[in-house]
Amino acid sequence: MTLSGHAVCIGADIDTDLVIAGRYLRTKDTSVWAEHVFEDLDPTLAPRLKGAVIVAGNNMGCGSSREQAPVAIREAGAIAVIAPSFARIFFRNAINVGLPVIECDSLVCGEGSTVTISLEEGWVEANGVRHPIRPLSGRMQEILAAGGLVPYWRNR
Amino acid sequence: MSTLSERILGGPAGTYVDRAVDRAFAHDGTGVLAMEAYRQMGNPKPARPETVSIIYDHIAPANTSQTATLQNELREFAAEKGFALTDVGGGICHQLMSEGRVLPGEVVVGADSHSCTTGAFGAFSTGVGATDMAAIWAEGSTWFRVPETISVNLTGCLPAWCEPKDIVLTVTGTIGMDGGTYRALEYTGDGADALSMAGRLTLSNMAVECGAKAGLFYADKTTQEYLARYGHSVERQEPEEGTYCRELSVDLADAEPVLSVPHRVDTVAPVTDYAGTPLDQVFVGTCTNGRYEDLERFARIVRGQQVACRTIVVPASRAIMQQAAETGILAEIIAAGCIVGPPGCGPCLGMHMGVLGEGETALSTANRNFKNRMGIGAEYYLGSVATAAASALKGEITSPEGAI
């Protein structure tokens, strides 16, 4: 799959409390999570996520195992998250909820740059420069292609 | 020749393995999400329901009707599926799993990031998300990437006024919040051998704070004696020469009381750097430091005195609370002016009772000081139980060195 969107840049070590605060977890309504995503980091961020590729620093999604974090990002309309490294539970949760997460050490781009991603060919492109990404395992790509672990499981 | 993680998962670092899960647990927060995912998967028959526990700890007892209703739904689901349920008041999932439910060599997954706690028994214990947990309920197994391992060699003995908590904060400061990402920590050495099980659980608990997926100790005589109390007879695990991606050495004799300074766990500084900082609240408890040994140490310091700020003490489990009641330390903690909460996570995750107000400052024995976590617009420091006790007595950040 090839994905393309505008870059929304956030910093390093963004913890899951900053992605979605604990006070919004007392519900199963995913639209509440989408509305409040990244609120404690930057309250102006959520409306800019429609069709966005989030470009984060190291250790994206550290902290809690709360799966609401990648769900909130997905529900807010972001199409992928790129970072040099991810906290491992967040990374696995993102794949499981169908949110592409891409490890790339070299991507540098500004807010609003167009970022294109090819999972199959293993690259991201911004400002006319292609950067290699760490490949996902076959199973991870299958889960993402199915839209997450639940549909993947149901299809099997 | 392999690391403990490689031995338990059965493959060299970097490879992907499918493994049967020996114990799987979720709490009232993640359990509800896992239940939802499970239903969306078509509500299959669980592969091995006898390995599954649901433990109510995060908002326990419920704070609103909405929470209570979700908890009721999960109660009914657990009964329908044949999962063991520990209801409100039993304690924190990681503590309950450490009370005889996890054995050396097992593969343990919990739908909570601090599930690495029971690595203290020589199990491969790690946290997963709710959808992963649902698939594990259905299949009884899951995939793992076998982690590279950071070896942490502990030598020497802790000074009387220091605790394993000071060590793990110092190690987290050294490795950094992302220095253990995709890796496991393995604690060895004569300093590790000398640590109590409570101390080992504290070190394993915080492995995830540097991004690690597991924090392990080799099962030894201490492990055998501890698990014998729960009726288990277990084999020791002997360390082999393994290949490590990084090796650290920590002399416990060099330890000093330290704090994690808001809002990063890896911003670690000596307590003395912040001495005199006024505190609105002190919190002793959580899966990091709510064990009997912690409460006993706290009581020993505050005994016969009065705390000078709001001080909340939450035993990590009913068994701990009961033991504290029987030995009289609970009465001493109450007499010192502390509030004692029901066994569970308490205010740690900022979802109910004990949450901080805007502009407030606290000292907590928990494992996370992320911005806004324990109260919007508040700041909180992480420290040892002794630091918490000495600070509670003065109402300001205080080194425990003179208190012990």
Image (cartoon, helix red, strand yellow):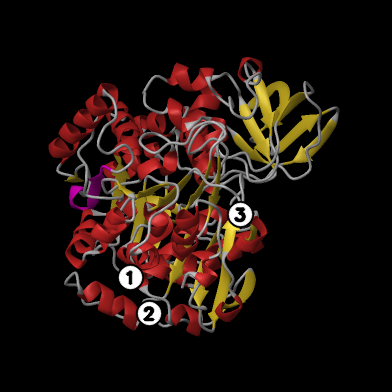
Give neighbour class at mark 2: few <14, some 14-19, many 20+ (Cα, 10 Å).
some
Question: Are discs 1 and 2 located on one and the same chain?
Answer: yes
The residue tagged with tag 3: helix, strand or loop? loop
Q: Is residue B52 magenta?
A: yes
Residue A77 at what x, y percent from top left?
58, 18
Give whichever of B101, B315 is nearer the camera. B315
Give the residue displayed 55% in from the left and 50% down from the top.
B381
Q: Which mark is residue B94?
A: none
Three-letter code, disc 1 = Pro
Residue B207 at what x, y percent from top left?
51, 59
Q: Chain of mark 3?
A: B
Q: Which mark is residue B104?
A: 1
Sequence order check, earlier mark of 1 and 2: 1
* Pointer 2 residue: B237
Asked if residue B148 is positioned above or below residue A123 in the image, the reply reads below
Give the residue displayed 56% in from the left and 61% down from the top.
B169
The residue tagged with tag 2: helix, strand or loop? loop
Q: Which mark is residue B276?
A: 3
Sequence order check, earlier mark of 1 and 3: 1
Give whichever of B304, B104 is nearer the camera. B304
Find the magenta span and give its range: B49-56
Give how far apart the Cα atoms at labels 1 and 2 are: 8 Å
Sequence order check, earlier mark of 3 and 2: 2
Residue depth check, mark 3 versus mark 2: number of the one nearer the observer: 3
